[in-house]
Image (tube, rainbow, N blue to C red):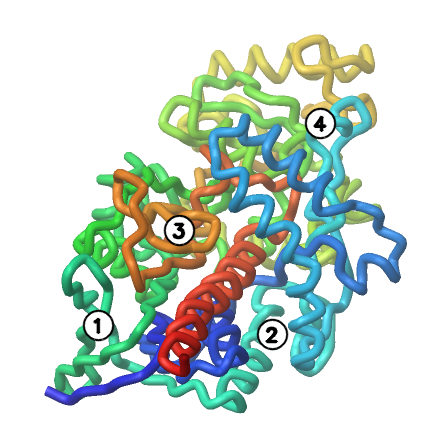
Amino acid sequence: MKSIETDVIVVAAGLSGLASAISAAENGASVVAFEKSNTTGGAANMGMGPLGIGSRIQKEHMISLTPGEAFRKHMYFTHYRVDARMVRDYYFKSGDTINWLMDMGVEFITVSRAFSAPEATRAYSDGEFTWHVVKPEGGGPPGPRSASAMIKKMTEKAVELGVEFKFETPVNKVIMENGKAVGVIAKDKDGNEIEARAKAIIIATGGFGDNPKMINELTGYEFGKTIYNFAIPGMKGDGLNMAWEAGAGKVTPVMELMYQLPDNMNHFILDGAFRQPCLWVNKIGQRFMPEDQIANTTFTGNAITTQPGMIAYSIFDSKLLRKYKKNGPDIISHVHPHDLYEHFDEAWERDITNGYEPIAQADTIEELAEKMGISVEGLVQQVEEYNEMCEAGFDEIFEKERQYMQPIEKGPFYCCRQHVGAYGSVGGILINHKTQVMTENYDVIEGLFAAGSDACNIFGDSYPFILSGNTMGFCLNSGRIAGENATANLVEEDEEDFS
């Protein structure tokens, strides 16, 4: 068995692992980062950018949101059922973390909010300008995978600081001695075991989004049936299982909910085209939420979860489609292309021809209901009621914004079945505000830290979409905090040795 000794071991080199490694190395520690894949970044390579509050960019854009305001909004959103000290430290650090990234050469194209709420609900559900969208490598408009440019710069910085990466070398066990974490057991791509010893271990493996068994056991969702989450290869829950085996307290994890089409990245135009405030119904044909709120994907994912079969349907007619083609979408997404309706016909015909099952087109409402498995009687009655309210100019049920009260009356009719989606899992390992792992009795496990999605217990039951970029923001900042606190112990030990 090969042996390694270092100051700090980082388990996985995703966003939180990279932040941990860089932070520890900046504080003078020798760092070895083990990564089961052949590259850095993990799920963050799919993202667009992190949250930051108080950054240089926000000040330049006259954005006045303060860390204290964000803290209070977050805590009100979660009803104080999360660690207030952790949330406070994270938000107050987040602006400096954006500056830290910029000093590495990361470029941000804008500071944005993920959505804008209607006037009637703006006071308590509007998105704040916290999302620092990364400028894609090579330029061009931002979109999914923009953040890979940030990962590249962070990886270069880690290498510059002397961080040693062990790729295709997953860790499978934390070595515990006398209640203290002292190392890990890993295995390289040739099957050779490695025993690595260190004064601090930081777990940052990104959750269990690629583990259907854990998803079902821990959250109750069934992958591919009741939830369609991003399943980034390798996100198997290794870090949670290792930490729990080492004595860590267990916090019930949740899925970071949204909504999407099955295999949505291969049906991206349609995925975006139906995210509009048209008519949304459930399996029995009834509306279930004000459709002008669907831009908050967390709220919509929650709402779909409570519907029969955990599914919903968005419907528009040919007249509304012509409007979208002429004027663009009613709700503009920062994720989907703004010109998506220019490509709608091509994408629609391709998917209809290929038998993509979640969509259907019909000349009558009755036929549409039959094709999609919606109650025919229920949908016919709902469309009639809805059209009457559109004609009157007022939504008597949900008070949807008047401008979006557009009737469904002229065939052909287009329908898309919407499913609960998720970016992945969050939470599971009990930590304190210093990211130290704790037992179920809240005793600190010496030498063991956890960061990122493995320990993101600050969202309560729902992702706070009102403060966008939050998952990547927590990964970055908890990683920095872990690196700093892991090396703070080393500095203290060095001072004791010197004295």
Whole-angstrom CA distance, mark 3 to mark 1, is 19 Å
Q: Is residue 108 above or below residue 477?
A: below
Location of mark 3 (residue)? 455
Whole-angstrom CA distance, mark 4 to mark 3, is 27 Å
Location of mark 4 (residue)? 124
Whole-angstrom CA distance, mark 2 to mark 3, is 22 Å
Image-quadrant location for residue 170:
bottom left
In which quadrant is the N terminus drawn? Answer: bottom left
Which mark is first along the chain, 2 or 1? 2
Tell me what residue is drawn at x 43 percent, y 55 percent: 435
Residue type at tag 3: Ala
Which mark is first along the chain, 1 or 3? 1
Whole-angstrom CA distance, mark 1 to mark 4, is 46 Å
**Residue furthest out toward the front:** 499
Secondary structure under badge 1? strand
Q: Position of residue 193 (x, y in %)?
A: 13, 82
Q: Position of residue 290 (x, y in %)?
A: 65, 23
Secondary structure under badge 4? helix
Which mark is first along the chain, 4 or 2? 4
Find residue 184 and name its label: 1
Residues at marks 2 and 4 touching, judged by CB atoms closer than 8 Å: no
Front position in the image: 265 or 412: 265
Residue type at tag 1: Val
Which mark is first along the chain, 4 or 1? 4
Residue type at tag 4: Tyr
Image depth: mark 1 or mark 2 in front: 1
Image-quadrant location for residue 48:
bottom right
- Number of numbered discs: 4
Location of mark 2 (residue)? 150
